[in-house]
Image: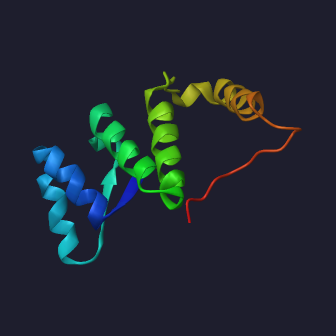
Amino acid sequence: MKLTIERAHLDLLVDRFADLEHLRSQLRLGERAVVEITDLSQEQCDFLVDLYRGAGSDHQIQAAQIITLRGVMEEPRKIYGGEELEDFMVDLARYLTSDAIRGWLFSNDIS
């Protein structure tokens, strides 16, 4: 999953974590950079969440998105083989209904 980070927040992130300097090259083409969330450490994600929380209500969604994505990425997962399709379908149905609200499945789009 990729994150889009605006220039102001990216500059602060890179100033704090020099190993992310390569992300600034993306700013030559625009005002945003794109990074895989798995390429950021937990400490870097926490720093970015704190930046978004401090940036006001307009950026609260980005903070929540990072927290949610990190939670999903850290959750243990099972890798299914080709012969385990039936097990996968049962587990998928169980996953989709485990946190359903009144039988509904909701999605979240940052835009």
State which quadrant residue 111 falls in. Answer: bottom right
Q: Is residue 20 visible?
A: no
Rendered position, 75 above or below 111: above
Horizontal and vertical percent position of residue 100: 79, 35
- Foreground residue among 109 and 6: 6
Q: Is residue 100 left or right of residue 1?
A: right
> Where in the figure is residue 82, as x and y percent of width and height?
54, 31
Which quadrant of the structure image shows residue 41?
A: top left
Task: Tell whether 15 sits left or right of 60.
Answer: left
Height in image: 29 above or below 85?
A: below
Q: Position of residue 57 (x, y in %)?
A: 54, 57
Q: Is residue 4 above or below residue 53?
A: below
Residue 98 visible here: yes
Specify whether 10 is left or right of 52.
left
What is the x, y in percent for residue 78?
A: 51, 23
- Between 104 and 5, the one lying in front of the other is 5
Residue located at (50% from left, 24% from top): 77
Q: Quadrant of residue 109?
A: bottom right
Residue drawn at x 52%, y 39% is 68
Q: How is the image coloured?
A: rainbow
Residue at (35, 37) in percent of width and height: 46
Residue at horizontal 51%, vertical 33%? Answer: 72
Q: Is residue 5 left or right of residue 93?
A: left
